[in-house]
């Protein structure tokens, strides 16, 4: 039985078996009397708004026999005053919408169901994301409710060209996905490619939300650690990207948004770059780039200089390790790299009431005690402390870990092959960045490769481009 029958008892029997009403306490089927006809309301307790259901019941119970002599379309328009109402007669789509929170009304004699959208989802407040905070600017952030996220985008872009295209992925989860773009600015080829890929996804469920979708969209090799997508939890950043002609992909139950196409320069941008005057924004952006480059090569460079102390200029002789080296410097760096990640993971699972004592204990153990015990040299601890802090100078977790993996490669190659290993590690890092594959199929280092001077200047310095240059950037 795939379509609605005019016999309501047959519909009730079939639907009760399909969605296991008797086994689920939160699936409600409320049988009511509408004039001389029988009716039944199906809804999910927790998704339906109680006050709307109450008013709807009052309206339905007040109906008379003559009110039910009209067609389903007339009944929908005149006698259901609450919520968005659609008509459907296919059971598979009805069940999907019912399990999504839509209230379904069956009436004896009608071969269509009335789908009344008066649902609400449990949600947290639209507070600022912990990882992407700004010193000045908007303090709201995306949440796990898709409709609320699209509303925050609409609030910022009041333009009829803004399109929110809805799709569903997953045989079991049937997760809602919204593709957001400006119709008059988006790259049509890229948009078609993204939509086709989403529609062709064959998967049981998006168990990990955004990450599951990302792995389905990009089927290439994931050995390259550099991020294939840009993520943001800020509505202002997502809206600005969409206005530039990019595509924002939002997944229900996920507070982050994927931005396409992706480049390294775009990932390293932050909202603070634009909430301050151009000179301040430029300083913040260049500082971030320089700090990340230094964090990548600092410890390998120090290791190389300790292997060849004769290369150290007279003015920098103070950087030499003067204490006894009980453990090879390479091993010290590797232990500290893994120890910092261990502390980070422990901090995520530490109750908030214990986070401060935990931080104090960890600082004592990794600081004074490890140096005095001879495990680590103070110079090694100093440089690793800078690297650990520098990892948080940019917002992307994925980029931070990619730089960490490249730093580990540099350290190991430098420790094994000295200067040639250092040079080889730099080449490997550059190739990993330049050859990183993305869904857009475009170079990860644009506008450096292919070279576009004006757009490169814009990515490095906080300046405003003329309209013609903006259009060129949008087409890319």
Image (cartoon, rainbow, N blue to C red):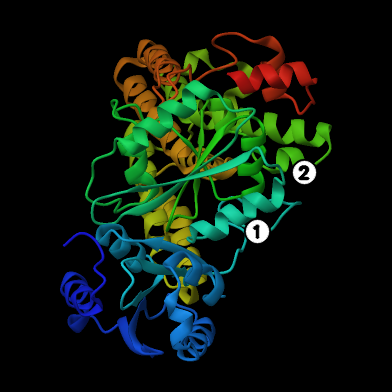
Q: Is residue 25 above or below residue 393?
A: below
Q: Is residue 266 above or below residue 95?
A: above
Q: Earlier in the sequence, mark 1 or mark 2?
A: 1
What residue sits 54% from the left and 70% below the top?
A: 83
What residue sits 64% from the left and 43% below the top?
A: 239
Residue 119 appears in the figure: no
Separation (CA) of disc 1 from disc 2: 15 Å
Q: Quadrant of the N terminus?
A: bottom left
Q: Is residue 190 above or below residue 90?
A: above
- The quadrant where residue 129 appears: bottom right
Residue contact at pointers 1 and 2, CB within 8 angstroms: no
What residue sits 64% from the left and 10% below the top?
A: 452
**Mark 1 or 2: the one toward you:** 1
- Dot 2: what SS? helix
- The numbered disc on residue 275 is 2
For the residue pair 57 and 150, the one nearer the viewer reads as: 57
Q: Can you identify the residue that label 1 sits on?
A: 140
- The quadrant where residue 211 appears: top left
- The numbered disc on residue 365 is none
Residue 369 appears in the figure: yes
Give how far across and how far down residue 378 sits, in percent: 49, 43
For the residue pair 274 and 432, the one nearer the viewer reads as: 274
Label 1 CA crowd tier, 10 Å (few <14, some 14–19, many 20+) = some
Number of numbered discs overlaid on the protein picture: 2
Give how far across and how far down residue 402 sits, in percent: 41, 33
Q: Quadrant of the C terminus?
A: top right
Label 2 CA crowd tier, 10 Å (few <14, some 14–19, many 20+) = some
- Dot 1: what SS? loop
Compared across the picture, whether 137 is left or right of 55 comes to right
Q: Is residue 30 above or below residue 160?
A: below
Give how far across and how far down residue 117 sits, in percent: 47, 68
């Amino acid at each position: 039985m795939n379509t609605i029958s005019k016999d309501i008892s047959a519909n009730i029997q079939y639907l009760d078996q399909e969605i296991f009403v008797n086994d689920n306490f939160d699936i409600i089927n409320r049988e009511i009397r509408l004039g001389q006809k029988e009716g039944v309301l199906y809804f999910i307790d927790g998704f339906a708004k109680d006050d709307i259901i109450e008013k709807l019941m009052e309206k339905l119970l007040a109906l008379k026999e003559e009110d039910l002599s009209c067609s389903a379309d007339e009944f929908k328009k005149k006698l259901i005053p609450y919520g968005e109402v659609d008509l459907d007669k296919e059971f598979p789509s009805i069940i999907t919408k019912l399990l999504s929170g839509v209230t379904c009304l069956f009436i004896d004699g009608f071969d269509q169901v009335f789908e009344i959208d008066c649902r609400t989802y449990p949600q947290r407040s639209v507070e600022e994301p912990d990882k992407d905070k700004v010193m000045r600017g908007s303090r709201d952030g995306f949440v796990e409710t898709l409709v609320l996220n699209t509303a925050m985008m609409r609030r910022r872009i009041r333009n009829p060209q803004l399109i929110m295209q809805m799709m569903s992925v997953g045989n079991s989860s049937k997760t809602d996905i919204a593709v957001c773009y400006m119709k008059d600015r988006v790259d049509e080829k890229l948009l078609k490619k993204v939509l086709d890929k989403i529609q062709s996804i064959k998967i049981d469920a998006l168990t990990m939300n955004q990450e599951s979708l990302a792995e389905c969209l990009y089927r290439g090799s994931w050995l390259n650690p550099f991020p294939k997508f840009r993520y943001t939890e800020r509505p202002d950043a997502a809206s600005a990207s969409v206005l530039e002609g990019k595509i924002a992909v939002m997944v229900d139950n996920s507070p982050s948004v994927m931005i396409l196409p992706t480049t390294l320069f775009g990932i390293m941008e932050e909202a603070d770059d634009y909430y301050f005057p151009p000179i301040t924004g430029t300083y913040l952006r260049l500082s971030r780039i320089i700090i990340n480059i230094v964090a990548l090569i600092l410890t390998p460079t120090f290791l190389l200089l300790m292997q060849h102390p004769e290369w150290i200029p007279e003015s920098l002789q103070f950087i030499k390790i003067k204490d006894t080296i009980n453990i090879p410097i390479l091993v010290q760096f590797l232990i500290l790299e893994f120890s910092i990640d261990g502390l980070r993971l422990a901090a995520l699972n530490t109750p908030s009431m214990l986070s401060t004592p935990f931080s104090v204990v960890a600082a004592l153990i990794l600081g004074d005690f490890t140096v005095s015990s001879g495990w680590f040299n103070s110079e090694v601890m100093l440089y690793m402390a800078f690297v650990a802090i520098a990892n948080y100078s940019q917002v992307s977790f994925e980029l931070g870990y990619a730089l960490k993996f490249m730093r580990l490669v540099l350290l190991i190659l430098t420790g094994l092959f000295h200067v040639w290993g250092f040079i080889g590690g730099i080449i490997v890092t550059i190739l990993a960045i330049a050859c990183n594959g993305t869904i857009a199929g475009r170079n990860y280092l644009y506008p450096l490769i292919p070279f576009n001077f004006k757009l490169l200047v814009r990515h490095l310095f906080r300046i405003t481009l003329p309209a013609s240059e903006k259009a060129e950037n949008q087409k890319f």
